[in-house]
Amino acid sequence: MVEGRVQRVELEALLRTEARIWLRPLGLLEGAAAEAAIAAGWALRLAGGGIAFTSVEVLARLSDGAVAAAVASLPQLRVWTRRLDPGAAAEIMHGLERLSAGRPAWAGLSLDRPLLMGVVNVTPDSFSDGGKFLDSERAIAQGRALAAAGADILDIGGESTRPGAAPIAVEEEVRRIEPVVSALAASGHIVSIDTRRATVMAAALDGGARIVNDVSALAGDAASLATVAHRGAAVALMHMQGEPRTMQESPRYTLASLDVAAALDARLAACAAAGIPRERIVVDPGLGFGKAVEHNLEILARLALFHGLGCGVMVGVSRKSMIARVTGAEVADRLPGSLAGALHALRQGVQILRVHDVAETRQAVTLWQAISAGG
């Protein structure tokens, strides 16, 4: 089991290790309980939102590669932090600040409320819709329908990145997405381009897209970092182990959530070096991209860890094969599992949900918000 790869140790020993410390928020509260705990000083706001956390799981990768962990309340953590040398103490406090700080607007959208990114696949072979919107007019109509149903962002993709998918010619990818992006952007919608290629990014940005959503976290094309930096685009960095054709061939992790967070942290550093500031970035752990079902489930369990990267978090559970692995549901029957994953992500403070079923997800989100406020 994944949890078997975590060694439980005493907090004092863990805090004194020379390894980097990661903090995963625990003891999550909502509504009036969250506000009361924050006011009393024994909880912190999670990513500046309406959820509070009262404790943390402290994680570190040891010199032998194993992951050690301890759990502490925030008052306990503060007491032990005061006993550390100034450098180690500053690292812990910086980690808490990153977890609790509010997130700036992204692509002109406030992250103070849950955002829905609606998926429009202009492809013949995507796993979720099988070419239903390959025709540009149908794709444009679908985008407008998703926006009317409550999508804040329309994510347009011209190349399937499902497991086993082969790459297509860049010219074909541009041909598929250009009319769709241009029409939807001209209608006033916020458009995202789902691509790994700088040429496609540039074409979509020329057509009015505001966001680049890259499954390779801007590592799949040597020109991607410069393209996003120079255009001033917002970007979603997704983690993928390997590439679509081979990513599901025996993916391996020590602890998937921590491994993925560290990989995304490295990509954030690459973005900073290229001139892309953190406030223009959200991260996505990439469920299903080079991950077995047990990796996906462990990442979902520790989603709050990703707030420690200091930017917004996006998650796509919608219609993923992991739902079938757990429940046996075929693609057409995965809405209940998709909604369960979406609501779990919201309770972990995730700001953006990438979904296919926008109307249903919007209803679930709206009710979740009302229940949270009612407490």
Image (tube, rainbow, N blue to C red):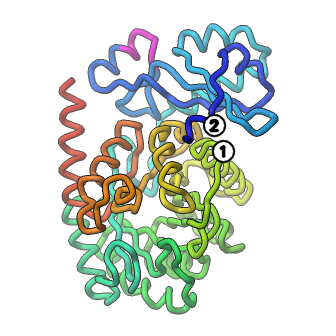
**Residue 199 is covered by the magenta coloring:** no
Q: Is residue 237 visible in the rendered structure shown here?
A: no
Q: Quadrant of residue 347?
A: top left
Mark linked to residue 5: 2
**Which kind of residue does numbered mark 1 sit on?**
Thr
Q: Quadrant of residue 290?
A: bottom right
Q: Which residue is mark 1?
A: 254
Question: What whole-number distance in Å separates the C-alpha atoms at marks 1 and 2?
Answer: 7 Å
Cβ–Cβ under 8 Å for marks 1 and 2: yes
Closer to the camera, 130 or 239?
Answer: 130
Picture coordinates of residue 313 (x, y %)? Answer: 48, 47
Q: Residues within 10 Å of mark 1 (few under 14, many from 20)?
A: some
Q: Residue at x 50, y 91 (%)?
A: 172
Mark linked to residue 217: none
Q: Please give the range of residues in magenta.
A: 37-43
Picture coordinates of residue 332 (x, y %)? Answer: 25, 68
